Image: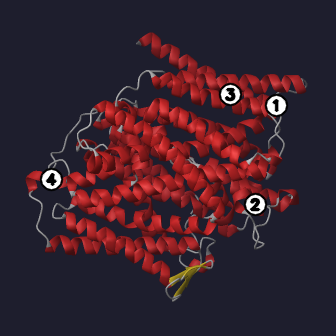
Amino acid sequence: MRLELIDYSIILLYFLFVLGIGFWLKKKIKTGNDFLMSDKSIPLWITSLAFISANLGAQEVLGMAANGAKYGLYTTHFYWFGAALAMIFLGIYMMPFYYGSKARSVPEYLKLRFDEKTRTFNALSFAAMTIFSSGVSLYALAMLMEVLLGWNFDLSIWIAALIVLVYVFLGGLTSAIYNEVLQFFLIVLGIAPLVYLGLKKAGGWKGVLQNVDDAKLHVWKGLSDPASNPMGVDYLGMVVGLGFVLAFGYWCTDFLVVQRAMVSRNLDEARKTPIIAALPKIAMPVIVILPGILLLAISAQNPEFTLPKTADGSPNYNMVLPVLLEKLYPNGILGVGITALIASFMSGMAGNVTAFNTVWTFDLYQTHIHQKGSEQHYFWVGKITTVAGILLSILTAYVARSYNSIMDLLQLVFSFVNAPLFATFFLGMFWKRTTGHGAFWGLVTGTSTAAIIHGLSTAEGKGGWLLPLHNFYSGSGQAFTIAWIAFTTCFISTVLISLLTKPIPDQLLGGLVYSLTPKETIRYKKWYQNPIWLGLAILLITLSLNIIFY
Amino acid sequence: MIDLKAVIGCFFLLTGLILMLYQLYTDSTDLLPQVNFTTGLFYTVFGAILLLIWKLDKKKA
């Protein structure tokens, strides 16, 4: 792939805008609250787009296109089943507790609801996870630019990291959120023409139906037997593992995304943020999954579109988007496409760094190191943490380059932490009898169970490090099963330990638990202003899509 | 605070104009079927609409 002056001009224009936002916001960001919490002043349309854009990182854009080619329409379960339901649930039921409790972060809610040890456990695992994700984004960006464009690996890492550092350092969370929205439009409008051209080249949807294996063109058909669907997953794994545990665990408890709703101007807007975000989210498969399916249809008719192979001879699905960009985009729009990819990497990185600096400053530094600092003090701690977060991400990117298998292992460990977390939040918010000891030991048990199941099972040659007792048809099947078992274990252990330990007095749980929180009733003039009706409308659209593509 | 609609509008307006001018410079015949020109036109219109909304919002305020 060869870029020309026109392509570089577009990349440069994007960098100028991204940095310009940081410089522009610099004057407005004066306190720790402004820097880390955006002073709770962001309008609804921005928080909603930032909510999905924080998740629209490299893994999403490149990874979902790869999954589209590998698993076909089954990949849409991440959107039409998992994400949509979880985002609506977050908006209607969970946001009143996050926002209403005045917690500044998700771990801080755990402190208010349970105790310090549960908060610290969550804060530490989350902080490590964000740095790891940010570093992997950086590594993937530099690798892609090296392979595609022949850019120097080190230079790509340092330039991307420096740009993210400058705009986050100057404008804090507001700058990251503003840039996420710009990046959202760039990713959508930068890849949309590729989908159009791909569809044309494939011979329209008719061409797709004729050239792609029928098993990849259904969403639910074939789930009764994991051997008969490309994802290798059964109903239980898909519905409970992905649709309930993993999706709800991610969308309802991961501070990276929840933070975007927590900086809304009021509770009503905080509740609507994930619900409104669900609307573009269910349309997102057109941009991120369809290219993978289109490539299958195109390559069946045009061998030059065949994916390159990996070392073991299997198709390198991660190259779906790069191959389409190279073959379908002429110079000019190619610059926009490459900028969209760069934007997705930077968006993922900035989202993680801003979530990391908030959790570090409020949940670890202020709690365990320096409790009574001034606003100005925490403002500077937030800024220094941003620099440290970027440097740690760079270090992680280099570690990822040297020890790829260590990164796989770390990613797995973090998935063990995330799966049972939803059980803790669910019980904490809806069962007042849940205690701090129950929550903490439930999390530890759930996480350990996930690790043990992984040690006892294999999939695609991975896992089974204790004793390979069972083999899954695919890595996804293994991950989804581990998720629901870890969730169930955490749920049961939390309930049992809570019943054996001293209950928390009701007067300490007001605003933190559903049954002890007064229900606020707002009269809306129009039905679509009501989060519940809005959520139901989105559910109806999602249901229709599932039926159409059954 | 800066208005994000104006920023995004400006970005797409400029990107769209660059793409259209580039297409004009490289090939001035049959512009509309060309990817760069068509996409550039779309970006320009999208950017202009956002700028218009920003202007109207500003007037209202």
Would residue A18 be seen by someone viewing this image from the given angle? yes
Name the residue nearer the viewer: A542 or A111. Answer: A111
Q: Report the Cα–Cα distance between label 4 and label 1.
A: 61 Å
Task: Give the residue at mark 1.
Answer: A5
Which sits earlier in the primary sequence, circle 2 or circle 1? 1
Q: Residue at x 34, y 41 (%)?
A: A262
Which sits earlier in the primary sequence, circle 2 or circle 4? 2
Q: Residue at x 60, y 54 (%)?
A: A397
Task: Give the residue at mark 4.
Answer: A509
Q: Position of residue A538 (x, y in %)?
A: 44, 47
Left or right of A16 in this view: A99: left
Which sits earlier in the primary sequence, circle 4 or circle 1? 1
In the rendered structure, which amino acid carries the disc numbered 2?
Leu
Q: Report the Cα–Cα distance between label 3 and label 2.
A: 34 Å
Check contact, mark 3 vs mark 2: CB within 8 A: no
In the rendered structure, which amino acid carries the disc numbered 3?
Leu
Chain letter of disc 4?
A
